[in-house]
Image: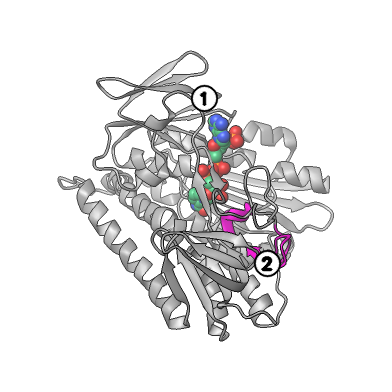
């Protein structure tokens, strides 16, 4: 049997890589992890965690407006971006440190270096100029934002830079209609930046239920975000005052800053995977099977670099399943079905399962339950904001196959709905659950009226 330096070499210390490395090391395996940036990956360093802090920071302006409706006279509230940035960076440093400690406590070695795969069992630590061998290699390098190949694209920022702006702009144009575009539109708008969202499609959040898509766009506009649909950048120009976004339809928009949030791509460039014979998809994603195995028997990949479901908890579960399979002798596959997701737009979205359109295609006859109403918190003072609750039910079995929510706390609510729906709950079982009153979530178990497709069209 070959004598390797390590039992496992992990490239990338993000959510998936760290989970796999820790579990493998805790089994007694000799594990090393290479990370070229800070430990924690996209989620901790430039994604979910700092984004959520920014969402929290930006929500206070809306809370203050609501407070006025309840009789409060907000004191001279003002927001200091540098103070927030310093606090945010301190917390991110703390969390990154915990990741390092956890790796060390588990017994894994950490190399602050860029790693490159040389052959199926060899990794080069580029800056140290050292080669090491491993029985197994796990690629967990995540993804990176991309920019379109148009004139002036280099002038626009992406989410990577949005976390470290020296000062807040007075106005921003955000291109894109996905998770990141919507979340940052809410953040900047909440922080007082005049925000315009431009998206090429007929509505935002492609892949989500159509009622959700229409509802979110409408509510974002209600909060002051200008949403321009069916429109995309042709070029970006720098002027003395700021930037001009020249759009493909001939229109133009002036702003202090332009941000592209047009998706992320698997980060495999320069990793040496092709040289080692690892098959990549057209967009650079590592092609893997249900056990996260590549076509090279000693190389695996988990997380965004495989472009399956690009969410932190999914990467963690894929990393855990890999470790369970390879180091604990328990073949484990992560089930990618019924993974709930949340968009921290303002208002936020929580969704799990099939959209109405998907269910009609896959299952034929479906029952749709839908409610749009003003949450109690806002009716008190006549606020116009509305939330949306929609259930998609397979007619033949009465199983709930989709749940789609927009409104306050819906990311929290969807987590629990996902448990029941993943377990195959039927509508009668769901309805037999007594409501918790007075809450927004109680509306979920009191939906009785089915909607016809015609009514649904009208409701949207
Ligand atoms: P998304 O895939 O969510 O959205 C990309 C957007 O860019 C889409 O609206 C897409 O439009 C648009 N787009 C793509 N190419 C072009 C182009 N050439 N010209 C104009 N528009 C274009 O990517 P994000 O970057 O927002 O997020 C990446 C992933 O990260 C998400 O899919 C999600 O998996 C994850 N994420 C999760 C979060 C969460 O859990 N809350 C938060 C942030 C990210 P179209 O729809 O027409 O294709």
Q: Which mark is residue 232?
A: 1
Q: CA distance from mark 2 to mark 1?
A: 37 Å
Query: Can residue 289 be found in the magenta stretch?
Result: yes
Secondary structure under tag 1 reads: loop
Q: Position of residue 252 (x, y in %)?
A: 41, 17
Quadrant where the C terminus sits is top right
Q: Nearer the viewer, residue 349 or 287?
A: 287
Q: Residue at x 49, y 35 (%)?
A: 147
Residue 293: in magenta span = yes
Q: Position of residue 240 (x, y in %)?
A: 25, 20
Task: Please rate how many residues cluster around mark 1, counting C-alpha atoms within 10 Å: few if below 14, some from 14 to 19, many from 20.
Answer: some
First in residue order: circle 2 vs circle 1: 1
The span picked out in magenta is 288-310
Of residues 225 and 320, the one drawn nearer to the viewer in this rendering: 320
- What secondary structure predominates along the stretch shown in magenta? loop
Residue 37 quadrant: bottom left
Q: Nearer the viewer, residue 342 or 410?
A: 342
């Amino acid at each position: 049997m070959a004598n390797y330096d390590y039992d496992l070499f992990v490239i990338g210390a993000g959510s998936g890589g760290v989970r796999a490395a820790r579990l493998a090391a805790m089994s007694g395996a000799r594990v090393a992890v290479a990370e070229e940036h800070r430990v924690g990956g996209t989620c901790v360093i430039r994604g979910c965690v700092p984004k959520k802090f920014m969402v929290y920071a930006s929500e206070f302006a809306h809370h203050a407006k609501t407070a006025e409706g309840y009789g409060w006279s907000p004191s001279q509230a003002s927001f200091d971006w540098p103070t927030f940035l310093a606090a945010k960076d301190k917390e991110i440093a703390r969390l990154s440190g915990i990741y390092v400690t956890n790796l060390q406590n588990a017994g894994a070695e950490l190399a602050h270096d860029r790693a490159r795969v040389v052959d199926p069992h060899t990794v080069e630590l580029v800056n140290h100029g050292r080669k090491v061998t491993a029985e197994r290699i796990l690629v967990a390098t995540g993804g990176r934002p991309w920019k379109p190949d148009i004139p002036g694209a280099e002038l626009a920022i992406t989410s990577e830079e949005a976390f470290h702006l020296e000062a807040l702009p007075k106005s921003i144009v955000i291109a894109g209609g996905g998770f990141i575009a919507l979340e940052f539109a809410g953040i900047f708008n909440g922080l007082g930046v005049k925000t315009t969202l431009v998206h090429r499609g007929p509505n935002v959040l492609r892949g989500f239920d159509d009622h959700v898509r229409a509802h979110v766009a409408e509510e974002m506009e209600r909060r002051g975000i200008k949403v321009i649909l069916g429109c995309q950048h042709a070029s970006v120009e720098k002027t003395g005052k700021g930037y001009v976004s020249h759009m493909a339809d001939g229109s133009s928009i002036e702003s202090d800053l332009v941000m592209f949030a047009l998706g992320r791509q698997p980060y495999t460039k320069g990793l040496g995977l092709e040289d080692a014979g690892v098959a990549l998809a057209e967009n650079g994603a590592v092609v893997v099977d249900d056990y996260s195995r590549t076509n090279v028997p000693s190389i695996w990949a988990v997380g965004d670099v495989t472009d399956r479901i690009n969410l932190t908890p999914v990467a963690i579960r894929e990393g855990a399943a890999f470790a369970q399979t390879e180091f604990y002798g328990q073949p484990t596959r992560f089930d990618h079905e019924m993974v709930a997701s949340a968009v921290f737009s303002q208002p936020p979205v929580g969704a799990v399962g099939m959209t109405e359109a998907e269910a009609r295609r896959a299952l034929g006859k479906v029952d749709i339950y839908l409610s749009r109403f003003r949450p109690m918190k806002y009716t008190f003072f006549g606020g116009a904001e509305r939330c949306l609750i929609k259930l998609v039910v397979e007619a033949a079995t009465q199983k709930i196959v989709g749940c789609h929510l927009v409104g306050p706390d819906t990311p929290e609510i969807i987590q629990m709905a996902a448990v029941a729906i993943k377990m195959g709950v039927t509508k009668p079982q769901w309805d037999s659950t007594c409501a918790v009153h007075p809450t927004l979530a109680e509306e979920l178990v009191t939906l009785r009226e089915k909607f016809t497709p015609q009514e649904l069209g009208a409701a949207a």
